[in-house]
Amino acid sequence: MKIAGQPVPHESAHGHATGEALYTDDLAGRFPRLLHAWPVLAPHAHALVTALDAAPALAEPGVAATLTAADVPGEADSGANRHDEPLFPSEVMYHRQPVAWVLGETLEAAQRGAARVSVEWQPLPAVLTIADAIAAGSFHAGPLHLRRGDAAAAMKASPHRLQGELAIGGQEHFYLETQCAIAWLDESGGVVIESSTQHPSETQEVVGRVLGLPRHQVTVECLRMGGAFGGKEVQANPWAAIAALGAWKTRRPVRVRLPRALDMALTGKRHPFLARFEAGFDGEGRLQGAAIALYSDGGWSLDLSEPVMWRAMFHADNAYFLPAVEVAGTVCRTHKTSQTAFRGFGGPQGMLVIEEILDRVARTLSLAPELVRERNFYREGQTTHYGQPVKDAARIATIWRRLQASSGFRERRQEIARFNAAHPHCKRGIAITPVKFGISFTATFFNQAGALVLIYRDGSVQVNHGGTEMGQGLATKVRQIAAESLGLPLQALRMMPARTDKVPNTSATAASASTDLNGAAVADACRQLRARLAPIAGAMLGCPPEAVRFAGGEAFSEGDLVQRVPFAQVVEAAYRQRVALFAQGYYRTPGIHFDQKTGRGEPFHYFAYGAAVAEVEVDGFTGGHRVLRVDILHDVGESLSPLIDRGQVEGGFIQGLGWLTVEELLWDAEGRVATNSASTYKLPAWSELPEVFEVAFLEQAAEPGVICGSKAVGEPPLMLAIAAREAIREAIAAFGVGGVVALDSPATPERIFWAVERGARRAGFRRGRGAGGGSGPRVTLAEVNGLACERFVGSLGGVFEQSPWVAERAWWRRPFGDVDALHAAMRFQVAAATRAEQLALLRAHPDLGARAAMSATSAGEQAGAGLDRLTPDEFARLQRLNARYREKFTFPFILAVKGSTKHDILVALERRLENGVEEEFQEALLQVYRIARFRLEESVT
Amino acid sequence: MALDPHPDTFSVEFLLNGRATCAENLPPHTTLLDFLRSRGLTGAKEGCAEGECGACTVVMVKDRRAGTAYVPVNSCLLFLPMAAGQEIYTVEALAGNGSLSEVQQAMVDYGGSQCGYCTPGFVMSLFAEQHRPGREGPCDPHSMAGNLCRCTGYRPIRDAARELGPAPEGAFRARLANPAPRLVPVSCPGFSRPGTLAECLALMAGHPEARLIAGGTDLVVEANLRQRRFPYLIGVEALEELRVFRASAEGIEIGAGLSFAEIDERWRAMAAAPPVPRAWDDWVPLFASPLIRNRATLGGNLATASPIGDGAPLLLALDARVRIAGPRGERMTPLDSFFLDYRRTALEPGELLVSILLPAPLPAAARFYKAAKRRMDDISTVAACFAIDLDDGGRVLRARLALGGVARVPLRAVEAEEAILGRRWNQDAVRRARDVLARTLHPIGDHRGSAAYRLALAGSLLEKFWWEQQEELAA
């Protein structure tokens, strides 16, 4: 039986469930004479340290030592790229930045000591928002550019244009295990660090830099992490450096562990973004040109902000072809925590912007958002705005179609319309959004990995590679790969923690690519070992080496079901014949490149695709919402480990949902993180789990050239959660009368509440806002509001062609604040009606150009468009098209002709003949709504 | 991990994983979690140190209405002396002879762990649920609502819970056939647990610096997060006088020392008591999480006098009175004169809350609402409880509009109540009350919500109350 592709539990699941799986801080009890470190924290967001005296701390009982710049033998900086992160700064750059550390026999002693360190500050003005940074010209990097075509000209030539702004909140990683490192000196004076780090090699580099040691004197091990999500890609380094420095100075083991409040105050988060955008589009919602300016809040140091911005810019297309586009990205420098990698790495922010634009396009044109999205999808053969061919672009539409069908999207849309019509204060919304996410580090050189596989004489195996385990299932998948390759049961292979003395110069476990990279490197090592063992086994089995197969812990000859040799025997024979039983493996991703100067290249090995449908319910009284149901169809290639992959998809979705809804990261006016604890910063909890949560993988999607045909799955699903945000927007829209729904992110209850208020105010609904407010009374509307049902139907029954039932059902929603509200109420009734009623309504409309059987009102409208003055040719063309239309769709062509010329009508008729049946059905209803609007304006003032 | 030696060290004994354990020479603010980890029991993790994440969950054996139960609690919120005499189990006790317990196996099989850091906490909550006395049907996933997971999105954990059947035969099930250990008085430097109310009052008189501690869900957070140190703590857990629950013609009397979980159980189980009002049903699941409800007490929730505590609005709307004991005997005071100012109550030095009386008859129609960023287990932006009694003519006979999160104290909006008294309970009345609320409330803005939103919510929730009543009437 194949092992790769089986839904096996997490490699450490047993240890997780029993508590036996150890995390860095669980080792603390194993170090006698361990010292605990606590920082001296700055009380300002920006200030000069004019004097610092750590000596008083030493007077505190239990304090063993202090750490200041004078103690650093090497370079006192932990900055990953730019060396811009002083460990003992003379100018503090964010609130609570550590300026010195105290080491105590107990944590409490260290804390008491830190309180006694005397520091003098000279406060300086602080830049705390993106807007401030833009105004002050305070930037780390940029503007970076990606361009295709002439966006300005394309927008100018577009029939419709819009512009807007979107503020996107950051996100706290809230890995359950906070930052932690324990350092001690080894037997020959080197330093060993147990660190909760995604990037042991970089932690090693930084520690070496700080201690002035060559890297061979520094060993970093990461057992496993209690979550990381990008937050320990570079930000584990300073804590490891302090622990190492403390161990170096005191010659004793030192532990640095940030409790939650400190972790939240000191470590970087997902970048908040501000996006300014402009777009030009045609009447069907196809984007013609777009200009997008992205600003990220990078915080005090550069960190990974530049590649995060690149990825945001790469993903400003999401799944859509942008014929002409200009994307600019600027990293703002503020006096806040240094924002860093976080699952998606800028991709989520970039995608959110294009989804925002498309939703606004749809609402500007009164088109269904999913229709506009679909019309803009990449097609096979197209390239991205940075010149990379969109491989398997057709999958976007395939996933879209299948997911709509499996989730019952269309039927549910109608059910929701009915629900909404019956619930004035509670609305539901449904939305579908796609994901296209590029896989690879965009810094090409990171796309390499190494492995070391050791076979022992009893046939047991240790697998080492450069990747770290943070819960994502890397160890599980790599074990499956190795087991498959060596034909061993899983328990024969032990996955070793990542150590820099086993595999050197590793890349961060990040960018979703760790299985692709490390899995391939391990497979390479296993391939070599198999090749060495095959001749040995062949000799034992009496068959040529190429006929040898390894499976189930045995070697056998292909086709021979009887004779088998246990793997351990083959190994022992190999040992006695002096065959090396260990191998190193190596892998580098082929064919990727990108030139930042020209903004062109193929930075990604492939794209991962997916789509989600989300349905939500919004309470108009509070702005609170509930996610009722989520359906996901995701492309993981050939799933290497379905239980792991499903976990990544679901967990990624919920984490994305948190980013877009409940998780609101706030700083106060002093620059303090205002939401710096679990009680003020809320993660998705049980209440955020949708009752129905369907996840499926795209079938027959094996990705050639990737280990086992699988695709990366760590990050892409996070962005599926955009569907929930769009569903919330759809629900908000249902409180109003259409038009753009402005909604910054995250969609907290308060933001939703005000968005509903704005919509309701526009619609003129009375929400009992107390005295004052609301539009002045209109005489005729007041009369309408006062009519009994029969008389109401008598005067408005003709607004929808020969369908007085619409008015009848809308009557109960009186009073109406204005004509918009009245129109919206009637429109709801149509949307909520059965399919048969809707069809009857469409069929009640007269044929354009046919004079007979017209209602008085319709005849007047059609005369206005010049349909009574057609030339014989035009008349014949109209009749011909009209007949084809009726045949295809079974209802007459309906167009809100007011303001249109006969030419417009003929063009529209021709164009709409190309529509699919369902699409045209919805289009026809929209036209009916518009006609009703004209009629209402004429009959009610 | 080494723990701080302390001049005022103590020694307490309790049962840990079935063995008598003695903790000595530790400062009294040491948490049970830190102690466990220092003993190498590192399955329980610190995720937040304030009872929000549940990664430190352990179970205590307690007597509950339906029988002896394993009660899951946050070990980060117990000062070690509070564990004295208790019987506690950690995740390390569950798997025996290399085989996983059913709960652990289900978590493994369903993919319930990813990074695994929160898993022991989930396992303990679910273990308690599987063994819950009187449980029928599958395990309730909401029993784990005090446990946060950042990786899985909860679906596999839910499925694991639903898969579990009755508690398996074995030592853990057998243990529940016998009662929980009785809490005995404790006295050590910096901490006392008196056995009677009289002893407690005497201790308070002798230690004016003392703070009372019941569940610890507030005070221990102060110690953990803000390094507050309390010179002397008096635990009220063993005071039977604070654990009453009685129904009489006068109303319902609820002991200030009962946990929320206990109160809810007792009320539902007591045939003589008036039925649980709708507002109570609304309120219970919105009050913190099961782990907190297992420890937090009504007395503590009121005495801490947080303007955003969720107990006060409910009790204010139900016209609650509080029984206070002190050096000069007992007194009763209406709850609406109990909250004097921000975090300040009418309790005089040496006094404590004994019980809360909900006078009969309870209002005919009352609902509790809570607006917060997260639907469940969050701190209120605004909480409200509205109770309306109508006369035969549909006019407002009694109105109680109680709110939290709109002022320095939880309050009754008396002026708004008066504005609708005697009026027909219709949209006009709602509008009148809203106008008064808009005029008289002056909430602050903070990270939970702007002042404008809070103000809007106060009125909007009242309108929601009215609408829901109409919908129920129609249905």
Image (cartoon, coloured by chain):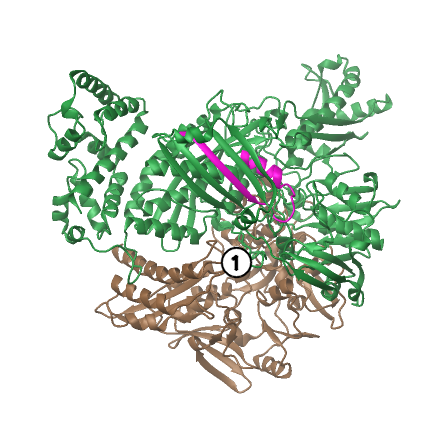
Q: Position of residue B34 (x, y in %)?
A: 69, 60
Locate residue B383: give its quadrant.
Answer: bottom left
Q: Is residue A634 visible?
A: no
Q: How packed is label 1: few (under 14 Cα within 10 Å), some, or many (20 or more)? A: many
- Left or right of B238, for residue A787: left
Per the rendered image, the range of residues in magenta is A287-313
**Number of callouts:** 1
Q: Closest to the observer: A524 or B157? A: A524
Q: Is residue A695 above or below residue A685?
A: above
The N terminus of chain A lies in quadrant:
top right
Q: Secondary structure at mark 1?
A: helix
Q: Is residue B235 above or below residue A429?
A: below
Q: Is residue B352 above or below residue A146?
A: below
- Left or right of A421, for residue B259: right
Q: Position of residue A832 (x, y in %)?
A: 27, 40
Q: Which one of the lettered chains is coloured brown?
A: B
- Tell me if residue A296 is in the magenta stretch: yes
Locate residue A362: give its quadrant.
Answer: top left
Q: Residue at x 38, y 30 (%)?
A: A158
- Tell me if residue A338 is in the magenta stretch: no
Residue holding disc 1: B290
Chain A: give its colour. Answer: green
Q: Residue at x 41, y 34 (%)?
A: A407
Q: Is residue A865 visible?
A: yes
Q: Closest to the observer: A219 or A373? A: A373
Q: Closest to the observer: B211 or A529? A: B211
Q: Position of residue A871 (x, y in %)?
A: 16, 18
Locate residue B470: give its quadrant.
Answer: bottom left
Question: Going by the picture, which residue comes out furthest to the right?
Answer: A188
Q: Position of residue A861 (x, y in %)?
A: 16, 32
Q: Which kind of residue does numbered mark 1 sit on?
A: Pro
